[in-house]
Amino acid sequence: MAQQLIVPKEKEHDNLWFNDYKLITFGSMNKIFSWDELTGGIIEYLSLCMHRQYSTPRGENCNFNKPVPNQTLWSYYNRIYNRDSSYLAAISLPYRLFEANSFLDEWEWSFSDEEALWSKENRKKLAINFSKINDSEKKLLCRWEHNRFCCYLLSRGWLPANSDEVKYYMRNGVQRHTLQIARLHPCLCSWDSLKFDLYDTLHAAYMGPIDAYGKHYDSRKNPIFEDFNDDNTHFQKIDEDNIRQTGDILNANPLLKQRNNEEFLSL
């Protein structure tokens, strides 16, 4: 049992008796109640950055140097789906970088130091390497990202919504293309279907009943549909924009988190 409760070759946190051999037990007070453990650490911050990017209108760049808008924070923490989806996207960043052949020139990280890979310097290096990939590689990454997203949804118990289901629940008051209470998502489809079949379905659904059109489906009155375009690429561009800003997400500096950390320590 003792062998299962210790991790060899970890960095020393405190000058405690069991650190004579640089062994640290799981669940130490310093680990559980560290600032990163309480706030979620860099992965939680990257998750919030993912959500900020997803919340940015299509075709625009999210400025991560600005404070997080309250509405964005509210939508991130208010819905489990938003936070869960963004968190899984953040966790998948190493795999995205691997698919893009974006590696560190010098492997300055190891599994014994969990903070090294996501250090500020290494995130900057990875962002620079990612910026060197061409447009054709980015298009392949978009397909990869959509496949990852579909696998994530399926692992959480979501099912694809067919065209009749989408039209039905949208014409009966649901203001988005997803029905979260039933875990139905029309984007559980192929990459090509995002552009044609899904767009046609939602375009018909947005027409809605005549008496409810102005309230739910008129893009001039409902900001949800403001960024719909005429080239049937709305849903594909969600992935395209996110892939395009991968470097910005990696370079995002958690200034607000650091400031809150200092305030916390001063209490």
Image (cartoon, rainbow, N blue to C red):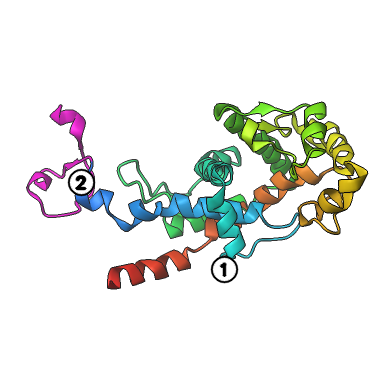
Indicate the secondary structure of the residue bearing disc 2: loop
Query: Which contiguous range is marked in magenta?
Result: 1-26
**Residue 153 visible to the viewer:** yes
Instruction: Residue 166: give x, y in percent of width and height.
Output: 78, 33
- What is the crowding at mark 1: few (fewer than 14 residues within 10 Å), some, or many (at least 20)? few
Q: Is residue 3 magenta?
A: yes
Count how many numbered circles sit on residues in the image. 2
The answer for how far apart the CA atoms under marks 1 and 2 are is: 35 Å
- What is the crowding at mark 2: few (fewer than 14 residues within 10 Å), some, or many (at least 20)? few
Please tell me whether residue 120 is drawn above or below residue 7 in the rendered image: below
**Which residue lies at the image location 70% right of the left edge and 51% below the top edge?**
241
Instruction: Residue 7: give x, y in percent of width and height.
Output: 22, 37
Residue type (three-letter) at the residue carrying disc 2: Ser
Q: Mark 2 highlights which residue?
A: 28
Instruction: Residue 192: give x, y in percent of width and height.
Output: 80, 32
Q: Is 38 left or right of 102, judged from the image as shown? A: left
What is the residue that sits farthest to the right in this orientation? Answer: 210
**Which residue lies at the image location 10% right of the left edge and 44% below the top edge?**
18
Residue type (three-letter) at the residue carrying disc 1: Asn
- 85 or 121: nearer the viewer: 85
What is the residue that sits farthest to the front in this orientation? Answer: 211
Q: Nearer the viewer, mark 1 or mark 2?
A: 2
Q: Is 221 left or right of 8, judged from the image as shown? A: right
| Label pair 1/2, CB-CB below 8 angstroms | no
- 142 or 101: nearer the viewer: 142
Q: Mark 1 highlights which residue?
A: 65
Q: Is 89 left or right of 26, judged from the image as shown? A: right
